[in-house]
Amino acid sequence: MQMSPTSRPVDSRGEQLAALRRTLFTGREAELRVLRDLLLNDRRGCFVVWLHGTAGVGKTALLQRFGDEARQHGRTCRTVDMRCTEPTPEAFSAALEAQGPPEVTGVLLVDSGELLGPLEQWLRHVFLPGMPTDALLVVAGRTPPAAEWRTDAQWWHALRSLHLPSLDDGEAAVLLRVRRVPEADIPVAVRAAHGLPLALTLIADARARSAGTGERRPHWELRHSPDLVRELLRLLLRETPSLAQADALYVLALARITTEELVRHGLGTSAQEARQLCAWLRGLSFVRSTTEGLVPHELARDALLADLRWRGAEKYERLLGQLHGYLAHRLSQRTGDRWSNGADLAYVGRDNRVLRAAFDWRGAHRLMPRPARQDDLKTVLAGVEEEHGDQAVLLAEQWWAHQPSAFTVFEDARREVVDWLIAPCLEAGTAEMPDDPVALAALEQVSAWAPLRRSERLLLPRWSTGAHGASPAVAFGLTTLWATTPGLAVSWTATVGEPASLPSVLALYGHQPADSVLDVDGRRVTPFVHDWRLVPFGRWSHTLPTRLLTDEPPAARAPAVAPGPPMPWPDFADAVKQAYRSMRDTRRLAENALLDTRLVPPGSGASALRDVLTETVARLCSSPGQQQLGTVLDLTYVSGPRSQQAAASRAALSFSTYRRRLSTALTKAAELLRERELYGQHGE
């Protein structure tokens, strides 16, 4: 018998609850459309629908909503919840019979279908063949239907499998408004829930309770509600994991992509145990298996990270340090895909306060970096024009013609270019180069305080998406280039405008601001500089976890280029030569210009400068490949005879060879002293 969906009065508690469900239900229009078509189509071939998705995505709510609609259309509806039903034919049949004669069932709803287990075979071979021809079975579970459903020819057209994704931001906002969440709180809640209806509901409840106690925070995050985190994890996991499984979950939360290799190195387990742990992770409803490895739902990732930090700093620091160390070593060894490895290393520190504020990390695991191709150029130039203007486009075109390898693009899951980075490499004395005022200023600045040597390169990250925030692609690209650019001596990253997202990230990474320069359009560009000759990538990556583990702003350090320009390099090199020539003349040494530099403490005299000069000679003598240069300086100015002819004889060199070697040694000593002036002794 058909009944009008609008004529039935609300005259029972069940119907009142159904009306309330209809009021609160949000989204799922596409899935409901499929179910309605199957419900109302008498000649359908499909009579089994399998809804699957992560815990909390709204499967039960969709089942209930569809059941209400089926009843409104006069269909007899039965529900079997496998959470309270044993997975045996007898228990299943008893649960069904308790609701009325099974043969009059029009729609059968099975909730928590992942608990069916061996009962799936009985459903296929015994139960379903005996159902009425107009009956419809809808199963909702955390996992897709077993392979037997998809490989058995008789079920190809009879079964429809539907994956339930998270709600989009608009649908999530509607749900929160229905729950009467204040409009000002909605963006924070939407961001924290990552589209999971269960999380939206729990967050709305938590925010409502905190509003009543005056504990609301303007910048609320999931980590601020440990009770909510615990409840989410209980619902997502259903069973308490073992200690090893819990550690594997934390690796899953920290890593961009989780593999057996990463679990093995991150936890220090055997290959067999890592394989078992990854197999267990793969079976969780909120974990997705990709071609690269395992990826959790964003909400599960956030909840697990919050739980890890709640359990104590020591465990979090140890695990972050182990993962970061392994990923940095893998990147520096240049094994595998360097872009993917660089993204992995940059991602693992994302829970730092600066990185959380600078970038939107949602979906960042889907960003796939690669070198740009000719067919990418139009997209990249359009982005440059939008973010940096017409004149920047003209320069970018010149850089493409001069150095296309400087262009990196980032694709999303649809293989569309969504981000890009333009970072040319410069060398001293390069004749052919675009007339780029920022590139010329970078070379001039570096040559003034630490000149590039032969085969050394300056990396100039010139333009990027993410320069004004949002995308972490720039962090992925820069990390990769810092580790893998051949001959990299200095990175000089250009930053423009507000907000200061990229500058704050570079400061966290230990890069120092230098004097601003004018761009081609008259805007000020502030560079952030790092000299990789003094702090190589291995030492830099070893100290980075310490900075990542603090939520305090990066400590201020002396800038890489002093606010007042240091002595020009030619004058500095000449002062070093004069100082060595005055080593034995205290009066003349006391007048040397090096006493006004940071090589010695303010107010120091000739004795302190002499000690610095002597230490530099000793450093050369002890450096592999530099001993002969150190010996020449030592014999000439420190411990040898007073005449250069005698020094050449002591060194067993012809006088012409001795003079050439002495000139080289003085230049090398000046370079070492310049590094010491700017960065401290031995680059510390």
Image: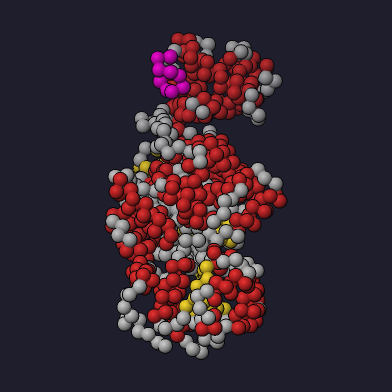
Q: At which x and y percent is residue 627?
A: 65, 25
Q: At which x and y percent is residue 117?
A: 63, 67
Q: At which x and y percent is residue 146?
A: 62, 70
Q: What residue is at 40 percent from the left and 20 percent from the top?
A: 596
Q: Is residue 85 above or below residue 103?
A: above
- Which of the pair 57/524 is nearer the observer? 57
Assess whether residue 681 is covered by the magenta stretch. no
Q: Is residue 469 above or below residue 373?
A: above
Assess whether residue 602 is covered by the magenta stretch. yes
Q: Which residues are magenta?
A: 596-604
Q: At which x and y percent is residue 22?
A: 36, 71
Q: Main secondary structure of the magenta part?
A: loop
Q: What residue is at 67 percent from the left and 19 percent from the top?
A: 651
Q: What residue is at 64 percent from the left and 24 percent from the top?
A: 622
Residue 76, visible in the rendered structure: yes
- Which of the pair 94/622 is nearer the observer? 94
Query: Residue pushed farthest bottom?
Result: 43
Residue 196: quadrant of the picture: bottom left
- Which of the pair 451/265 is nearer the observer? 265
573 with respect to 662 (left or right) = left
Q: What residue is at 62 percent from the left and 76 percent from the top?
A: 123
Residue 350, visible in the rendered structure: no
Q: Is residue 567 above or below residue 475?
A: above
**What is the quadrant of the N terminus in the image?**
bottom left
